[in-house]
């Protein structure tokens, strides 16, 4: 969230919830839905749910994977609708 807030987004955290997204980041011109993982991407079933999530054109669906030893450099994958 700190990385997104530094870019000017207002963030809400819902980690460990039953919903698809851990962070909802609202900016002046767009919104980012972020799923955060450590060391690995989500499994195929979870990725399918994330891709199938319906949202507007100005909403970015993203998976951020943080690797051990690189806590400030996530691998960011932008998901496209199926």
Image: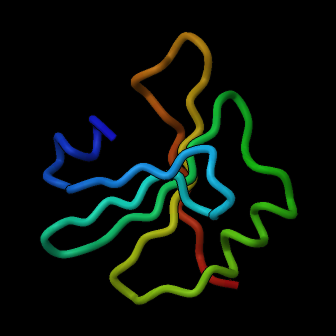
Measuring from the top left, give residue 17's x and y in whole percent.
62, 52
In this orientation, which residue lies closer to the viewer: 17 or 72? Answer: 17
Q: Residue at x 63, y 80 (%)?
A: 53
* Quarter in which the N terminus is drawn: top left
Measuring from the top left, give residue 25's x and y in whole percent.
32, 59
Q: Residue at x 49, y 52 (%)?
A: 14
Measuring from the top left, give residue 41's x and y in whole percent.
72, 44
- Looking at the image, residue 47 sits to the left or right of residue 76; the answer is right
- Looking at the image, residue 26 sits to the left or right of residue 33; the answer is left
- Asked if 28 appears above or below 8 in the picture, the reply is below
Which of the 4 image quarters holds residue 16? top right
- Looking at the image, residue 22 sits to the left or right of residue 11; the answer is right
- Looking at the image, residue 18 sits to the left or right of residue 29; the answer is right
Measuring from the top left, give residue 18's x and y in whole percent.
68, 59
**Residue positioned most to the top:** 69
Which of the 4 image quarters holds residue 32? bottom left
- Asked if 36 appears above or below 20 in the picture, the reply is above
In this orientation, which residue lies closer to the viewer: 10 or 30? Answer: 10
Q: Residue at x 13, y 52 (%)?
A: 8
- Asked if 59 appears above or below 77 in the picture, the reply is below
């Amino acid at each position: 969230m700190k990385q997104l807030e530094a870019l000017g987004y207002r963030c809400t955290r819902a980690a460990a919830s039953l919903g698809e997204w851990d962070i909802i980041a609202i900016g002046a011109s767009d919104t980012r839905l972020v799923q955060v993982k450590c060391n690995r991407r989500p499994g195929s079933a979870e990725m399918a749910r994330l891709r199938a999530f319906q949202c507007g054109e100005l909403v970015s669906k993203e998976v951020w994977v943080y690797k051990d030893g690189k806590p400030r450099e996530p691998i960011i994958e932008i998901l496209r609708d199926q």
